[in-house]
Amino acid sequence: MSIDYSVLAVLSCAALFAGFIDSIVGGGGLIQIPALFTALPKELPATLFGTNKIASVFGTANAAWHYSCRVRMPWRTTLPAAVAAFGFSFLGAMAVAWLPRDLLRPMILALLVVSAAYIFWRKDFGSIHRPQHAGRRELAYALIVGGAIGFYDGFFGPGAGSFLIVLFIRFFGFDFLHASAASKVVNVATNLAAISFFVPNGFYLPLAALCMAVLNVLGSVIGSQLALRRGSGFVRLVFLAVVSALILKFAWDTF
């Protein structure tokens, strides 16, 4: 279908802001997906989700590259988690056909509230980078974390990047900056898994995806550079803001 330039402009602006937020703490889908559904109400949901994933993967990959150039990436943890996330993202997408997603909303809302409260009261949570575990235990935890978030992202999605950051801090002793960097690599894997389904089946809008991808990358450049310059304290504040927005969205959708 043909898309008006005014609609493309709105979607591109949304992608710019989404790339900025997503590169720091995740949650770009909170911006891009509502923008797509509002601007293109006649399109199939699968087409809009496919367009969102194509736009997001370029910005997320760019953010991951910027972090890897400036931060010592924990590859021994991140790569196994990314591989598990890719595979389980497929399973999550398949589960959509037979599991009612609405049953998850109250549980996810509760997890978000508990996570936000814990991080707010624990001022030192994610402030020190002190990696934990090694060898088989590190590999096992990485596979579990990657598989769980990969399944969730394929099945449901919102807040996957934020949950990844919490889990990387909790189980591996990362600070917010390193957890955010590691989460980008895993998010690239889950996005690629989704794209490998959406694109072959034609569920995407090429022009919209291209325009949004360019602006998403620009937003990710600005966001990742700002996060690297300001450090973990800044990432923590943005994280709390994004999780608060997620809580409001889930509460609205649930009640």
Image: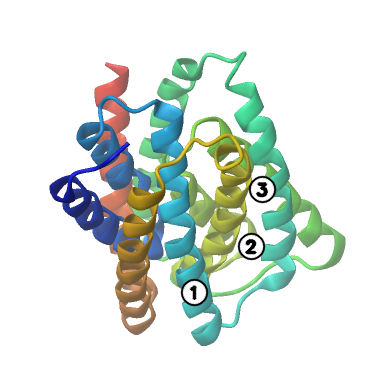
* Badge 2 vs badge 3, beta-carbon distance below 8 Å: no
* Mark toward the start of the polypeptide (1 vs 3): 3
Q: Amino acid at mark 3?
A: Ala
Q: Split into 4 quadrants, where in the image is the C terminus?
A: top left
Q: Is residue 4 left or right of residue 106?
A: left
Q: Residue at x 33, y 56 (%)?
A: 212
The residue indicated by pointer 3 is 85
Classify 10 Å Cα crowding around label 3: few (below 14), some (14-19), many (20 and above): many
- In this orientation, which residue lies closer to the viewer: 54 or 87? 54
Q: Nearer the viewer, mark 2 or mark 3?
A: 3
Q: Residue at x 39, y 80 (%)?
A: 228
- In this orientation, which residue lies closer to the viewer: 75 or 128? 75
Q: Is residue 170 left or right of residue 20?
A: right
Q: Residue at x 32, y 19 (%)?
A: 254
Residue 110 visible in this rendered orientation of the protein:
no
Q: Split into 4 quadrants, where in the image is the N terminus?
A: top left
Question: In the image, residue 28 lies at what x, y percent?
Answer: 35, 51
Circle 3 — which element?
helix
The residue indicated by pointer 2 is 172
Q: Which mark is residue 128?
A: 1
- Residue 140 vertical placement versus 244 (above, below): below
Circle 2 — which element?
helix
Classify 10 Å Cα crowding around label 1: few (below 14), some (14-19), many (20 and above): some
* Mark toward the start of the polypeptide (2 vs 3): 3
Circle 1 — which element?
loop
Question: In the image, residue 150 lies at what x, y percent?
Answer: 62, 43
Question: In the image, residue 215 lies at what x, y percent?
Answer: 30, 64
Q: Is residue 195 left or right of residue 205?
A: right
